[in-house]
Image (cartoon, grey):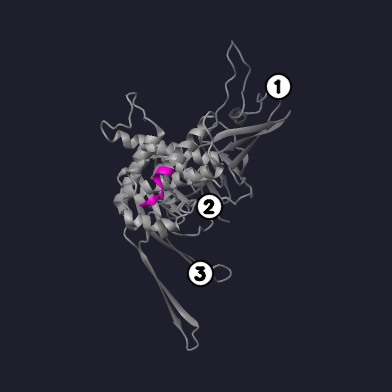
Amino acid sequence: MNNEIVKNVPRLGWLIDGNQATPDVAVMLFDAGDRITLTIPFKGELQSGQAGVGYGPYAEWFFPSGRATGGRSMQMGRCPRTLMFQDVDGPVALVGCRSSGFEFGSFSGSGTVVPDYCVLGAGNLKYERINGMSTEIHGLNYWLGLGRTEYQNDRDAAGRVVAGVVRTEIAEPVPLHHHLDLTLKHSWSAASPDRSGRFTGQVGWDIETTNEEDRPWEEHLALHQALRQLLTVATWRETRFTSMRVRRNDDPATVMTGKPVGPQWNPVVTYRVPMTAASVKQGPSLIKYEDIGQKGIKRWLHLCEELPDAIHLLVMLRDGRSHYLETALLNTSIALENLAYWLALKEPGSPQIAKSGRLTTFRNGLALIQQKVPVGVLPNWDQWIKDSNGSYMATKHKDRPMPSELTRYNAWRQNALVLRAWIATYLGVRSDVLVGRLPTDPLYTPYESA
């Protein structure tokens, strides 16, 4: 069998915690559909009504292991951050482990460990830090528009296809940022015919970060998430990772003799970031790679450092399946407030900054953003400023008159559109191109009363 984690299919194996003093114990690894769990059984005898006493070292990961003495409270044991699961299908490193509940009776019990990441095929327990991460995002290949694939079919006299050739040109890597050598790499893979005789080929782009010194997962992931968020802002569709792989320099790929032959990229299973195996329908994009190029992506990465909260609040509206009107309104309004303050600080002596160092008013902040966005983005800027300001203030303050529900829906819609239009302009999309694409954008059409 393959070393994989399948939803609702348990794997039984052995626990390795790197501590020679702890006994061997059989455990269960399970994908529950919203998290991955490792169940660790333990046995012993309940002593003096105290949970955990006599149950062995693993029980101490989940509850206090002794009596309170000398005025000191019992200390909770702590689960190691990295564990290893091993069964007949291979090893799995569990990274970012935390204790998550337990059950116990008079003579036995069990505890549950939840990891952030499961690294399939990992060869050691050092995966809390990594030297490289590679991810794929649905829609990235289509959005980039780089590389070329040609199809040639040979037909007989009746017009039937009798032979076919697929030719793919692998594009050169695209360096994006010096930090962790962030690079886009064109990839091509082919799968052998399955039982039905079907042959599968796949062309795409991998996002890759590497560093000689091992770094925390979150440092790598921040750059990968930034590119995922760019696609979300550009297309206003939910964007997810389709795969993730990581590597460590001290865990290379080897041949049967044990000789290293290069880096080993190990697949990752996680619920820590939005992942999907399903295809995503492609459509129009407000921002395209052909508009902004490498320079625009570098500006985007800088913007993610400067305005992380504003971008997160905006993207969050597409990461979730649904949101209340108030959530959408507050998210976009706070993001606009962040952007206005940032813009005002870029202008020495700006009248939008009060003596206290704060933004004068939200309304003034909207007017400042308006100056940075092409005129044709909205049909009536004055009406937007009025509706957006009134909706935000009424949502925050109960003593303000509440605009109609329809007004508030269109306020958050236009808020999001203005934010995305400003981002597009900042990244290098020409005004006429931007305005020309608006009619096909999901946020362009106003909400109307039923």
In this view, the residue in front, 306 or 342, is 342
Give the amino acid type for the residue marked by disc 1 in the picture. Gln
Residue name at image x 48 percent, y 54 percent: 445
Residue name at image x 36 percent, y 30 percent: 360
State the residue position of label 1. 47
Residue name at image x 41 percent, y 50 percent: 379
Q: Earlier in the sequence, mark 1 or mark 2?
A: 1
State the residue position of label 3. 199
Q: State if disc 2 and disc 3 touch (CB < 8 Å).
A: no
Distance between the alpha carbons at the discs numbered 3 and 2: 22 Å
Give the amino acid type for the residue marked by disc 3 in the picture. Phe
User: Which residue of the protein is positioned furthest toward the right in this rendering?
Assistant: 106
In the displayed structure, does residue 214 sit left or right of residue 111?
A: left
Give the amino acid type for the residue marked by disc 2 in the picture. Thr
Q: Earlier in the sequence, mark 3 or mark 2?
A: 3
Image disc number at residue 276: 2
Above or below, 182 against 354 in this view is below
Q: Secondary structure at mark 2?
A: loop
Q: Which residues, given as a range, are shown in magenta?
A: 376-383
Distance between the alpha carbons at the discs numbered 1 and 2: 47 Å
Residue name at image x 43 percent, y 58 percent: 439
Where is residue 324, by image quadrant?
top right
In this view, the residue in front, 400 or 107, is 400
Looking at the rendered image, the quarter that the N terminus falls into is bottom right
Q: Secondary structure at mark 3?
A: loop
Q: Is residue 29 magenta?
A: no
